[in-house]
Image (cartoon, rainbow, N blue to C red):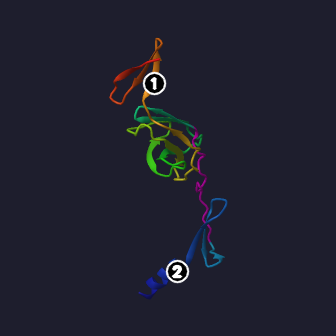
Amino acid sequence: MLKIINLVLLCLILCVEISSQNQIIIKRGKNKLNYFSSVGVDITPPSAPQNLLAVGGADKVDLTWVDPTSSDLAKIYVYRDETIDPITLLDSVAVGVLTYVDTPLVNGTKYFYKLKARDNSYNYSVLSDNAHATPGYEYFVTSDINYFKTNDNKYFLVKQ
C-alpha cells in the first residue's frame, strides 16, 4: 500500500511542458528527468478564411469565402450576431464547402458574420474579417418593368 501511495505522489509532482520546438519535456520540480520524449505535436493554427462576402435575399443571407490553404484543414465555423463582432456559433461546414445559406431570417435586420478555421489537430484560426448583409425582398428588372418578390414567392409590379 505504501508503494502505491508513493507512486501516486510521484505522479502528482511531475510536470509536463511543451517546448517551442514542439517537444514534450517531463520535469519534476525545476529539474528535467533523465529521459526526454520528443514527438511531433502540431500547435500551428490555420490561417483564417478570406474574402468573406454576405449577400442578403428574401429571408436569407448567402455567404461565400475562400478556405485557408492549410494541408490539414478540417472544418470552417460560421458565427453570426446582430452586432458588429459576432461571437455566436451558428454552424460548421466541411472543408471545400465555400458557401453557406443562413435562413430563415427576419427581413430588414442587419446580420454580421465571421468565420473561423480548425485543423485536424484542433488548432483554431483567429476570426475572419466581418461581413454583413440585410435580408429583404428580392428586386429585379425584366423588360423595363420592376418587380419585388415577397417571402411567399408573390410578385408585385412597382410603378415607375
Q: Amino acid at mark 1?
A: Tyr
* Viewer can see residue 138: yes
Residue 67 is marked as none
- Considering every residue shown, the one lying at the far top of the view is 143
Q: Magenta stretch: residue 55 in it? A: no
Q: Residue at x 51, y 44 (%)?
A: 112
Q: Amino acid at mark 2?
A: Leu
- Answer with mark 1 or mark 2, whichever residue precedes in sequence: 2
Q: Is residue 139 above or below residue 127?
A: above
Q: Which residue is mark 2?
A: 10
State the extent of the magenta-drawn residues as a range. Answer: 35-51
Disc 1 vs disc 2: which is toward the camera?
A: 1
The image quarter containing residue 27 is bottom right
Q: Nearer the viewer, residue 15 or 144?
A: 144
10 on left or right of 147: right
Position in image of residue 37 (x %, y %): 60, 65
Q: Residue at x 45, y 84 (%)?
A: 5
Position in image of residue 26 (x %, y %): 59, 71
Q: Which residue is mark 1?
A: 139
Quarter of the image where the N terminus is located: bottom left
Count how many numbered circles sit on residues in the image: 2
Position in image of residue 36 (x %, y %): 62, 68
- Considering every residue shown, the one lying at the far front of the view is 160
Is label 2 in a helix, a strand or a loop?
Answer: helix
Is label 1 in a helix, a strand or a loop?
Answer: strand
